[in-house]
Amino acid sequence: MPPDRPAPGDRPWWQDAVVYQIYPRSFADANGDGVGDLEGIRQHLDHLSWLGVDAIWLSPFYRSPMDDFGYDVSDHCDVDPLFGTLEDFDRLVADCHQRDIRVVVDWVPNHTSDRHPWFEAARSDRDDPHRDWYVWRDPTPDGGPPNNWVASFSDAEPAWTLDEATGQWYLHLFLPTQPDVSWDHPELESAMHDVLRFWLDRGVDGIRADVLHAIGKAPGLPDDAPEMLPIPHSGLNHVPEVTLPRVRKLRDLLDSYDGDRMMVGEVYLLDTSLVAQYYDDGRGLHLSFNFPPLYAPWDATSWRARVAEVEALIEPVGWPSWVLSNHDNLRHRTRYGGSESRARAAAFLVLGLRGTAFLYAGEELGLTDAVVAPDRVVDPGGRDGCRAPIPWTPAPDHGWGMTDPWLPWPPEATAGGDAESQRSDPASILHLYRRLLAARKASPALTAGAQRVVEAGEGVLAWERTDGADRRVVAVSFAAEPVDTGFGADLVVEVASDGRGEGEPFSGVLGSDSAVVLRPAD
Ligand code: GLC
């Protein structure tokens, strides 16, 4: 078990945490087959300890046909041979805990693979006891799908597939090989609880719940409003009166364990007021992913609005979370136009704003998306670029034991952007992330102190963090020209995105696409 490290002020560990997302296929490969694995992760824990992260979140490593690269689970309680074994998992957790790194695992409650034994049984016969574990409907009189819902990863195709053999349509908000389970069926709900217990009993510290807002569907499965089409239904499904009672039970289950086990829910609704509802006044999620900032463009006005929403809507009901990149979206350096200075400045947002910070493996190296030639495309959702393998060492094999892994390398791999080269260069973005994590950990104000946005000139977003006498100011410039922030030499530069002037009084001027953490002069 991880050593007990009660946060000052009796906060649970996850409020102070920097959580590092690992996409197992792409992180590190111990057996040289070109696909990352659990042992590869274990062999790279030094990188994470050195960086200073508090927890890792592992995207799915369960048995799967890999149509959605693991988010199509065919056995929730076993490791896919591609990634290793349960023993490898136990070893990884033990080594993480020894290093005081918590482990969060993914849990996919909305759907399974169509090759999961539950679905194979369900589709075998209308009278099979597992039939109602999934969502089946008769065809409409003209033989069409039961409603107008649109599937994700499709070109506005129906979220329904007709099972010819049994003559009914089944629901799938994602691929046809990812049938939605029915949380209306108590035995399914209890089987899903058992999956959680399986991993919690194995010692994991938290759960990331995939598309959690989708587990409660509107009774009668009414059509989506025509003007909302063709947004996939997974981005629209919000039925709190059905979903929240289910989430409360999940919360109770997590809280029945010792050690502040945490559940962070993926609530893929691009409206912070909806995301906030899943905290359910302390009875729902511990953390709810809030993606509007992830989609905010690189400009101060948009970011000021996103921060204000979190302060107004999330703070009163729960603890915020911040995320800029994950395995489903272009990496933020790519989204923001590709410059490393912007990527450096953006790190001050995710690590400086009040809340739990989620980093996506490789962002600490400043990676951009790989360019994936049409004949290398493998993901049905077009997300290959952000899933490129992590370059650990210089060319040719980048520490993977082979030169041509499952996806092409990111562009930085051959430009000195590998982890080893960056580690030996104190001016690298990797060192910047490390300094930011250290500054955050060392300052109660930055870790969990109060937050107040302050004026700092056109194009700059600045905020003050305070905890008792401890005080920090963070300023991020989105401007094209240097800006006079109005902050004076009574503040010292603690961390600068370009590394310049650290430890010296702040000049007051912030360069374009740059950021600072300031502390009061002694
Ligand atoms: C979530 C995952 C994504 C997956 C989808 C379906 O959005 O993050 O990767 O494809 O759910 O499971």
Image: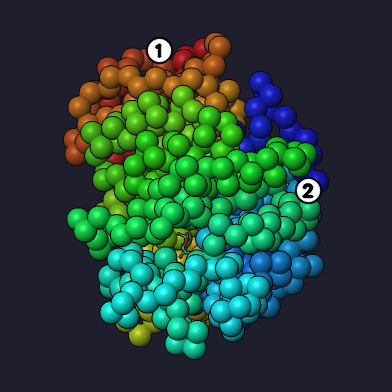
**Is 323 placed left or right of 374 in the picture?**
right
Mark 1 or mark 2: name the one nearer the start of the chain: 2
- The correct choice, above or below, for 298 with respect to 484 in the image is below
> Residue at coordinates 33% horizontally, 15% vertically from top-left?
488
Farthest residue to the front: give it.
141
Which numbered disc covers residue 98? Answer: 2
The amino acid type, in three-letter code, at marker 2 is Gln
Q: Position of residue 204 (x, y in %)?
A: 72, 51
Alpha-carbon span between mark 1 and mark 2: 41 Å
**Is 377 placed left or right of 49 in the picture?**
left
Q: For this rendering, which residue is in front, 472 or 144?
A: 144
Q: For this rendering, which residue is in front, 207 or 19?
A: 207
Q: Position of residue 163 (x, y in %)?
A: 46, 83
Q: For this rendering, which residue is in front, 514 or 59?
A: 59
Picture quadrant where residue 137 is located: bottom left
- The correct choice, above or below, for 19 with respect to 197 in the image is above
Q: For this rendering, which residue is in front, 257 or 145?
A: 145
Mark 2 neighbour density, 10 Å: few (under 14) some (14–19) many (20 or more): few
> Residue at coordinates 75% horizontally, 40% vertically from top-left?
256
Picture quadrant where residue 233 is located: bottom left
Nearest to viewer (mark 1 / mark 2): 2
Residue at the spot of label 1 = 490
> Residue at coordinates 78% horizontally, 48% vertically from top-left?
98
Mark 1 neighbour density, 10 Å: few (under 14) some (14–19) many (20 or more): few
Secondary structure at numbered mark 2: helix
**Is 454 placed left or right of 284 in the picture?**
left
Pointer 1 and pointer 2: residues touching (CB < 8 Å)? no
The amino acid type, in three-letter code, at marker 1 is Asp
Secondary structure at numbered mark 1: loop
Quick check: is the Cβ at mark 2 less than 8 Å away from ligand 1? Answer: no
